Amino acid sequence: MSALNINNLQNTFQDALNFGGSPGAVSTSPTQSFMNSLPQRLNAAKQQKVLKPFSTGDMKILLLENVNQTAIEIFKQQGYQVEFHKTAMGEDELLGKIKDFHAIGIRSKTKLTAKVLEQAKNLICIGCFCIGTNQVDLNYAADKGIAVFNSPFSNSRSVAELVIAEIITLARQLGDRSIELHTGTWNKVSARCWEVRGKTLGIIGYGHIGSQLSVLAEAMGLHVIYYDIVTIMALGTAKQVATLDELLNKADFVSLHVPETPETRNMLSAPQFAAMKDGAYVINASRGTVVDIPALVQAMKANKIAGAALDVYPNEPGKNGAGTYNDDLNSWTSELVSLPNVVLTPHIGGSTEEAQTAIGIEVSNALSKYINEGNSVGAVNFPEVSLRSLDLDQENTVRVLYIHQNIPGVLKTVNNILSNHNIEKQFSDSNGNIAYLMADISQVNQSDIKQIYEELNQTSAKISIRLLY
Ligand SMILES: NC(=O)c1ccc[n+]([C@@H]2O[C@H](COP(=O)([O-])OP(=O)(O)OC[C@H]3O[C@@H](n4cnc5c(N)ncnc54)[C@H](O)[C@@H]3O)[C@@H](O)[C@H]2O)c1
Ligand SMILES: O=C(O)[C@H](O)COP(=O)(O)O
């Protein structure tokens, strides 16, 4: 049994991968019970037999940003070579390195730009071991036939819990009282300190995190309103409002939970702060570009905004350590840190043991299934294609993975090439400019394989081909 992994960029037979073992599937689920049973799940995932390349030692995976150890264990279990780094990598370092790897695992700091991906001649897939995927040029990756996976909700609860803590922290000025005592000042005050019961929380973006936050906030007696670009079912007694301005006019606490997009850039800036209630609070644990920080600083200096909790920033350091967060990265840092009732955290919304373990398992399994079987379910930039595992008991069966431009006539051409064999099963789907065909063909002799590859490689719509057998 062997498999060809042929990348269109080189137009050569690049890797010869084989696979053996019994077909199987590793499934994950994001529920609380899933999180509670993580150790058992990890063991199960490790023990489960999956289709895997025979020469797994050829697969090279680069893991950055201290991706959870569970991922390393699962990749090693597959037999892949793993290179692990605790920090993010800058563009120059990536440009020199990425061409050697078949897969890369990152979190929110490493930028996979078109310039970097252009050098990624061997890259099959990218794993974002987090929710956000804005750090990857998703369209460019798709155009190159590189599938991108993430973990859509494994850290949602962790972020929602952090925001709950911040709502009370801001209402009671806990950050300032703590700093004062740390520096020797006893300052027992009740002025402008409030209970949160009966206050209104305005949630911008009612997705996985926003809706989870809604449930927790109502349990503490907050009234919840939310604004979203799509109509979403309210949980509990929360109410969707029609406009952002309506939310800003009514909320005592405003918490942002939108992705980084062109539309969300500076979503809260001077006009939005002006529209908020006097003495309102702002919480941003989404992306640093969503809040115009200089405008926030002005609104706080004018006593319009009574406090802010920020977990994310327009420029974030790629590693931990003193001096990494300073005016070199963000020109407004010194003004922000000098304001009262400002809570600053270093992008830790999703940084809990539970979330990181769950993400490690989920994303490494998704990447393994894509590498070993071609299964792209869960990809964020790519057609989602899956076939049940290849029947390894059946002799002379080959799985064809053909990624191509989404233009008319391609399936006819490809099926013509495959037509001398028996097409056991086939699935094709498209997403924008990209289409992906997966087919299991039987009655294929060793000598046919090279010919199939060469004929597929001649097709003008081809982006990349892998043959698993
Ligand atoms: N601080 C952290 O550590 C941390 C952790 C996880 C996620 N995040 C960030 O939080 C974001 C939200 O996460 P999620 O899992 O809830 O995402 P999600 O996709 O489940 O929800 C996002 C919601 O925002 C809405 N939305 C999009 N554009 C909007 C706009 N212009 N106006 C109003 N609503 C809009 C969407 O319709 C959706 O309902 C992520 O994209 C990520 O950037 C940060
Ligand atoms: O997108 C996410 O999931 C969060 O921003 C967390 O990112 P991190 O894994 O880099 O902490």
Image (cartoon, rainbow, N blue to C red):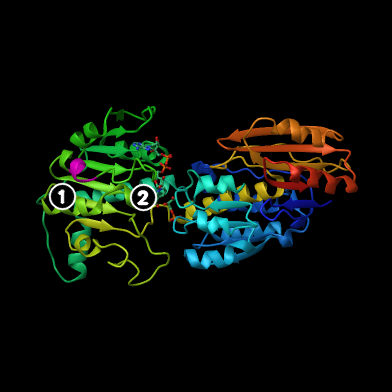
Q: Position of residue 376 (x, y in %)?
A: 63, 42
* In-image side of 418 versus 241 (left or right): right
Q: Residues within 10 Å of mark 1 (few under 14, many from 20)?
A: some
Q: Which mark is residue 101?
A: none
Is mark 2 in CB contact (under 8 Å) with mark 1?
no
Query: Does residue 84 show up?
Result: no
Position of residue 295 in the picture relative to residue 34 (left or right): left
Residue at image coords 27%, 66%: 327
Q: Which residues are magenta?
A: 269-273
Q: Secondary structure at mark 1?
A: helix
Name the mark on residue 299: 1
Amino acid type for the residue under numbered disc 1:
Ala
Q: How many marks?
A: 2
Give 410 or 162, whichever is nearer the viewer. 410
Element assignment for label 2? loop
Circle nearer the N terminus (2, 1): 2
Q: Is residue 216 visible?
A: yes
Where is residue 317 shown, x and y percent of the image?
Answer: 38, 64
Residue 22 is left or right of residue 10, and the answer is right
| Residue drawn at point x = 26 percent, y = 63 percent | 331
Q: Which label belongs to residue 287?
A: 2
Going by the numbered disc 2, the residue's amino acid type is Arg
